[in-house]
Amino acid sequence: MRLLGWATVVIAALMSATAMAADWRPLDPENTLIVDTSKGRIVVEMRPDFAPLAVARVELLSREHVYDGLLFHRAIDHFVDQTGNPNNRDGGVSAHPDLAPEFTFRLDPGAQTIARAAGDATDGFMGTSPFEGEALSARRADGTIRAWGAYCPGVVGMGRQAAPDSANSEIFFMRDAARRLDRDYTVWGKVILGLDVVRAIAVGEPPAQPDRMLKVQVMADMPPADRPRLEVMDARGSALKMIVDRARAAKGADFSICDVDIPVRERR
């Protein structure tokens, strides 16, 4: 078994934990995006439960090959890599209409992994994607709370112009955390493999020698033999709970949901 990932606390916890087969789950090919770039491969687990319109748009543009060959037209170290505009600069759009904002969603906290429940907020994971939400005391009659994607390293979002409903084709990859983007830009997934690639993309506004997305595919559209053989730790399992507990103990009052990254490994 070869573990893939970048969080030291995650690796240390895994090495001392007995993560059984039940602690791992396969990727859903319909909700996994494979982005082959000039610096290497990025694998994204998409979250239609966060943003169904955004995920559907990314899948549509991938299948129309709109993303193939587009430049990372703006990349800022310790912040974001932006791409996805057909004109390779800010302001470009696809032939499809702009999207309504999907900055928040309804969350059933009883069905998710909660990493921290405080008097003013709740945070945890849906799949590999981190979220933050209202306090559990704010549950509605149906048991849900209002939640939003947390802009931690590796999270992917929809770019937009000034208007909240102007997201179209632009996407961005977080090089590092920027929680000021929470509830202001739609989160549609999380990089599970290739954060090193995200951070290696040439920086600049625009870069002098920009990198590009060579080919973008929904994994379900790839021949089975060509699909990445990966599985991720199940956020609902005991192994991840141990990782979260160790990260919380190590960070104390400074603990953030961004201190934990869901492990991924090659499938046996």
Image (cartoon, rainbow, N blue to C red):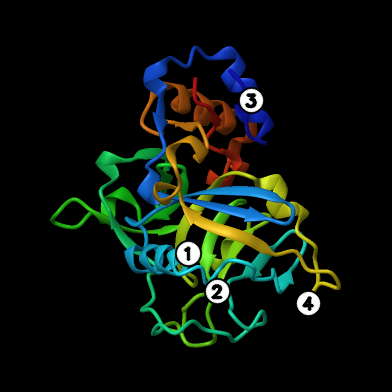
- Amino acid type, residue under disc 3 in the picture: Ile
260 horizontally vs 7: left or right: left
Label 3 neighbour load within 10 Å: few <14, some 14-19, many 20+: some
- Amino acid type, residue under disc 2 in the picture: Glu
Question: Of label 4 and label 3, which has the lower sequence position?
Answer: 3
Q: Residue at x 40, y 67 (%)?
A: 60
Question: Of label 4 and label 1, which has the lower sequence position?
Answer: 1
SS under mark 4: loop
* Closer-to-camera residue (75/228): 228
C-beta proximity under 8 Å, tags 3 and 2 = no
- Amino acid type, residue under disc 1 in the picture: Ser
134 horizontally vs 247: left or right: left
* Closer-to-camera residue (227/236): 227
Question: Of label 1 and label 3, which has the lower sequence position?
Answer: 3
**Residue pointed to by mark 4:** 206
**Residue pointed to by mark 1:** 62
- Residue 257 location, x and y as percent? 53, 45
Q: Is residue 175 visible?
A: yes
